[in-house]
Amino acid sequence: MAVIDLRSDTLTRPTPGMLEAMTKAPVGDDVYDEDPTVHELESRVAELFGHEAALYCVTGSLSNQLGIRMLVEPGEEVLCDVQAHIVRAEMGGHAAIGQVTTRTFSSPTGLAEADRIAELIAVGGGPYHVTTAAVAIENTLNYAGGKIQPYENLAEISELCQSYGVKRHLDGARLWNAHIATGVPLEAFGALYDTISVCFSKGLGAPVGSVLVSSADNIARARIVRKRMGAGWRQAGVLAAAALYALEHQLGRLADDHLAARAFAEEVAALAPSAITPDDVETNIVVLDTGDYDAREVLDSAAGQDVRVSQLGPRTLRAVAHLGVDEADCRAAGKILGSLLA
Ligand SMILES: *Cc1c(COP(=O)(O)O)cnc(C)c1O
């Protein structure tokens, strides 16, 4: 049996159609701002979100860092979820490079709430307190199991920020999944944020790349900071072509990933009901509670049966559906995890 690899939706390989699009892409030097395929991607994505401009970047960590840096001055803070990728999985870059400090709010249900954020916002603290310059929201929230942030919550948080003059960043690495699962238009999300980062290397299946969306002024400044960080790139259109192809051909199919993740959860729950409630699975990510079992041991046993998942904590595992697996794979994998957790 082939290995069923559910560790991440970053594991996808470019499809034949995508590779063909990459080889045919017209290219130029993007540091000179002369790559037509990069231009096409940037203007297409900016338009999707109803913003003025966009910047194609090598990773989401970079586009998050640039976006937040455009909103927060050194020594100021950004508020984010305690589980957020920006504070847990970007190697401290916002502090180490951007000189931005962070305070976190927790959301036990995985849903960001305006009330909790309101308790933390600090503006006008004079020379005594760090100034809150921005709030960052992650949608879907990866470590909470791909939770979709309800649009009403997001709108309320956005309004709260505006009432304090605090800027708004969206880590939308998997916003595509929220969009496909809920039908909320991308432009409606765009209206709530000053800067948005979206990834093409996750469920959309491109090999590389994220896009930062914002005002023309912010994007012009971000372009300079990106070059300073050594992340200017030349004929990046070869890669941008993959992202354009993904938008065109691989966005709608995210619904299949959501069904496959749900099928995986159902199979696990049939044998180990305390590990997962299938109704909690909203997109392509499933977080399993290993209960009395050590997550690492379960992970190793699953790997011994050709199913790979990743570990989130001492008692939690993560499985992610993606373009490289189908519903039958996910059901087979779910049976194996279910029997290990029963
Ligand atoms: C993957 C991811 C990113 C970006 O990660 P890179 O590996 O730097 O591209 C950002 N936010 C979230 C929530 C992610 O899952």
Image: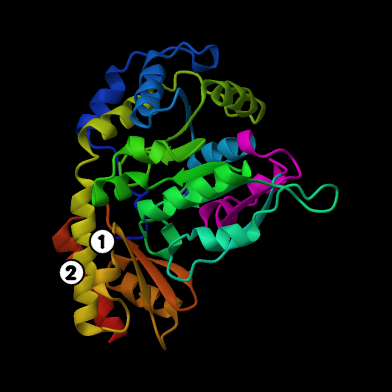
Q: Three-letter amino acid code at disc 2?
A: Ala
| Residue drawn at x 37%, y 28% as measured from the top left | 45
Label 2: which residue? 332
Q: Is mark 2 within 8 Å of ligand 1?
A: no
- CB of mark 1 within 8 Å of CB of mark 2? yes
Spatial separation of the CA atoms under disc 1 and disc 2:
9 Å
Secondary structure category for the residue under label 1: strand
Q: Is residue 30 above or below residue 116?
A: above
Q: Is residue 74 magenta?
A: yes
Judging from the image, the colouring scheme is: rainbow
Rendering coords of residue 104 (x, y %): 61, 60
Q: Is residue 58 above or below residue 319?
A: above
| Residue drawn at x 57%, y 48% as measured from the top left | 135
| Residue drawn at x 57%, y 58% as measured from the top left | 117
Residue 83 is at least partly visible in this image: no
Q: Of the numbered discs in the image, which one, if any, rests on residue 4?
A: 1
Q: Is residue 139 magenta?
A: no
Q: In the rendered image, which quarter is residue 28 located in?
A: top left
Q: Which residues are magenta?
A: 70-99
Q: In the rendered image, which quarter is residue 321 located in?
A: bottom left
